Image (cartoon, rainbow, N blue to C red):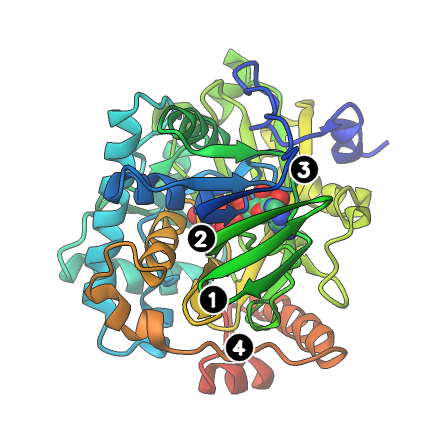
Amino acid sequence: MQKHIEALKDSKYCSLWHDQDVRPDTLPALSESTSCELLIVGGGFTGLWAAIQVKEREPDADIILIEKTFLADGASGRNGGFLSSSLAHGDTNTDHHFPGEADKLYQLGQQNLTELLDTLKRYNIEAHYEQVGETQVATNPASVTALRKDFEQEKAEGDNVVWFNKEEMQEQVNSPTYLAGLWRRTGQDGTIDPARICWGLKAVLLKLGVRIFENTSLNDIQPLGTEKMRVKCGYFVIQSNKVLMATNAFHNPLSKLRKSIIPVWDYQLATEPLNETQLAAIGWHKTRHAMGNHANMFHYYRMTHDNRITWGGGGAVRYYFNNGTNHNYADIQLRFEQLAQEFFETFPQLAGIKFSHRWSGIIATSTRFCMVSQQAFNGRVAWTVGYTGLGVAASRFGARIAIELLGYQPSDILQMQFVKKKPMPWAPEPFRWFGVWYTQKALVKADTNDGKRGLWLKLLDSMNLGFSC
Ligand SMILES: Cc1cc2nc3c(=O)[nH]c(=O)nc-3n(C[C@H](O)[C@H](O)[C@H](O)COP(=O)(O)OP(=O)(O)OC[C@H]3O[C@@H](n4cnc5c(N)ncnc54)[C@H](O)[C@@H]3O)c2cc1C
């Protein structure tokens, strides 16, 4: 058996973050019809941060939060735990879609991350945060040149960046594939345990009097007169003045919300904890960089609190026809084999290590590659969805926009293009599937061709629809 397949043999399909003793019990489902002032649908970061921020602004607000399965079962309990202040997926994307707002978005992103970390401290939420910045490595000569250019520019702009040549990079993290590296250390970016954030926020919300029902799904939503919304959850009904949809990539009955995002599956692995010999072989534990390679189909990988490596992204990422979110897509052996193979190409000296966990999650992707906030029913319903792979910190800001749209102390952020500009809807099927498939093929080709973007990617770039890291 090949070593990467052997390494996967005893892994269990379960998010590493879910598999912890501190995981709280699932709360009982809704068992009677009821009413509230604000109903939040979805128990991931967006829903939880929305509830916290409303309570901080208006402590008497009467809030119910419902979650279809259990809190953190969506992307919030399945991600890489890379904590980034970015709100709009990088400078190029920001300038394309929100010209003139880059500085303000930068400042809001930094402020959001500071407030997020302050909140965790204030409520004693231990989420294993590590302020390690973000490190991008070059694995081919073209990437070295591109990364070096980024370094020069960011240094000239006053950012806290460090350049590593080949030997220096391999001294930091020992992979024979590394030719150079760029360590971005400005601000408070780093890594965190995402499920622990959710569990911590859940405990705080219960103390603040928020009613939380797990295993409770919104099945239908209708206006009730001109003041309220009527939400059907199985046999029961919740009447609410306002509804905040925090359902992200999952199917939602509101077609306006559905059209703005597509669900993209992403797969991840975690190794068993590294022993002393394995740690010495890669040297990574000394600096604990949060890593990614400079490529379109990039891998993201990091060390955990107990010295495992989590490894995700790369070519395994997939969109399935007709917005497929069926469980059949969750545990596909081929995807994990591809990830495992790419892992050993990066760290051949870890041959023999086993993967303890394999899991997947759904990324809500918008055509502008960052969050989309909108309203319906005369402002009684609002949502923020579509963080496109960068939502661990950004979702707190997305939640802020959504609660302000619902009237909880609105501020000037609602006047920004970032909030007001309508996203381009995704094309209908089968064009959608074909477009994503073809674009992914083109991105892979560019990665194997020194980053050179072909005609299709150039066309998308010209329409501000091209994805580049
Ligand atoms: C594999 C993976 C890796 C990622 N890595 C990173 C990373 O390293 N850094 C980063 O910044 N971002 C990352 N992301 C993105 C980030 O995790 C998400 O942007 C963020 O978690 C979104 O939070 P959310 O609350 O909006 O959505 P979710 O966490 O998906 O929450 C939505 C919730 O709504 C519930 N729900 C859906 N429909 C209903 C209904 N009808 N009734 C009741 N409840 C419902 C779902 O069960 C779910 O719990 C990653 C995502 C994935 C999938």
Q: Secondary structure at mark 1?
A: loop
Q: Secondary structure at mark 4?
A: loop
Q: Which mark is residue 429?
A: none
Amino acid carrying label 1: it is Phe
Q: Give the image location of residue 390, x and y in percent.
A: 44, 53
> Alpha-carbon distance for marks 4 and 3?
31 Å
Asked if the residues shown at circle 1 and circle 4 are in contact, with their CB atoms under 8 angstroms apart, the answer is no
Would residue 29 be found to the left or right of residue 280 on screen?
right
- Work out whether mark 1 precedes mark 3 in sequence or the reverse, and give the earlier one: 3
Instruction: Please tell me whether mark 4 or mark 3 is closer to you in this view.
Output: 3
> Alpha-carbon distance for marks 1 and 3?
23 Å
Asked if the residues shown at circle 4 and circle 3 are in contact, with their CB atoms under 8 angstroms apart, the answer is no
Asked if the residues shown at circle 1 and circle 2 are in contact, with their CB atoms under 8 angstroms apart, the answer is no
Q: Considering only vertical position in the picture, is 189 above or below 412?
A: above
Asked if the residues shown at circle 1 and circle 3 are in contact, with their CB atoms under 8 angstroms apart, the answer is no
Number of on-image labels:
4
User: Circle 3 sits on which residue?
Assistant: 359
User: Circle 2 sits on which residue?
Assistant: 390
Would residue 140 be found to the left or right of residue 189 on screen?
right
Instruction: Please tell me whether mark 4 or mark 2 is closer to you in this view.
Output: 2
Residue in the picture at 63% in, 26% down: 28
Q: Give the image location of residue 335, x and y in percent.
A: 74, 47
Q: Which mark is residue 369?
A: 1
Q: The C terminus appears in which quarter of the rendering? A: bottom left
- Work out whether mark 3 precedes mark 2 in sequence or the reverse, and give the earlier one: 3
For label 2, being within 8 Å of ligand 1 is answered yes
> Alpha-carbon distance for marks 3 and 2?
18 Å
- Work out whether mark 4 precedes mark 3 in sequence or the reverse, and give the earlier one: 3
Q: Considering only vertical position in the picture, is 94 above or below 311?
A: below
Q: Considering only vertical position in the picture, is 71 above or below 452?
A: above
> Alpha-carbon distance for marks 1 and 4?
18 Å
Q: Secondary structure at mark 3?
A: strand
